[in-house]
Every structure is written in C-alpha cells, then in structure tokens.
Image (cartoon, grey):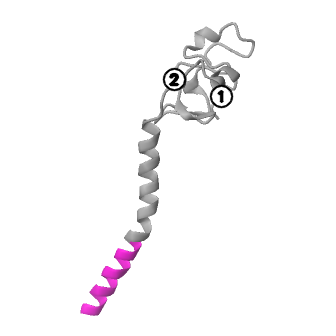
Amino acid sequence: MANRSRRDFMRNSLMGMAALPLGAGILSRSAFAQDLPRLDPNSDQAQALNYVEDAADASDHPAYEEGERCDSCMFFQADSEGCQLFPQNSVEPAGWCQSWTAQA
C-alpha cells in the first residue's frame, strides 16, 4: 500500500509540475495586458489608421459609419482594452480607426 501512495504522489507531482509553464504563461499574459499604455492618437501607427479616441471625431471620415466604436470591433480585447492592430497599446473603448470590423 505504501508503494501505491508513493506512486500516486509522484504522478500527481509530475503532472502539477508539467502544468506550471501553462499557468505561468496565462498569468503573465494577463498581467502584461493590464499594463498596456494607452495608444497616443498622434503616434505614426495611430495616424496611419486614422485612430481617434472618440468615434464621433471620425464622423467626417468616409469609412466611418454611425455606431462603430473600438469596443464593438473584432480586434478589440475587452479584458485589457487592447487591440490586435496596436498590440503594444490599449485603446479607448469609445474610439475608432479605419480598420474597424464588426464582431462575428
């Protein structure tokens, strides 16, 4: 009986150690996402996509349609206010850029 307990302990320990990198990756990604600096609308990257922090400011842009906002775009990541198009920054949820695409 003692051998079985030892084997169970070893197996469970090894499985726990194998799962550590996965857990650490998830935690570090979440921690990183919350620390993203807000995208500067004057940056070259933002200017290239006509990003504005208030979608109403894009009303004169030919690609803009009423109701389009970052928080309704498929590239927006609500948990971090991040955007796949600006991976190093967070964006204003009420913002807009010309690459806005409806969520599926």
Above-or-below relation of 94 to 104: above
**Residue nearer the viewer, 4 or 13:** 13
- Dominant SS of magenta comes to helix
Number of marks in the image? 2
Q: Nearer the viewer, mark 2 or mark 1?
A: 2
Q: Position of residue 17 (x, y in %)?
A: 39, 70
Residue visible at 47% across and 47% down in the picture? 29
Left or right? Give the position of 24 relative to 50.
left
- Can see residue 104? yes
Q: Quadrant of residue 43?
A: top right
Q: Which residue is mark 2?
A: 93
Mark 1 lies on a secondary structure that is loop
Amino acid bearing label 2 = Pro
Magenta stretch: includes residue 8 = yes
Mark 2 lies on a secondary structure that is loop
- Give the magenta-colored segment's residue range: 1-15
Amino acid bearing label 1 = Ala
Q: Quadrant of residue 103?
A: top right
Residue visible at 69% across and 26% down in the picture? 99
Magenta stretch: includes residue 50 = no
Q: Position of residue 33 (x, y in %)?
A: 47, 39
Above-or-below relation of 8 to 25: below
Above-or-below relation of 57 to 47: above
Q: Residues within 10 Å of mark 1 (few under 14, many from 20)?
A: few
Q: Which residue is mark 1?
A: 102
- Can see residue 1? no
**Residue nearer the viewer, 78 or 67:** 78
Q: Position of residue 53 (x, y in %)?
A: 55, 17
Q: Quadrant of the C terminus?
A: top right
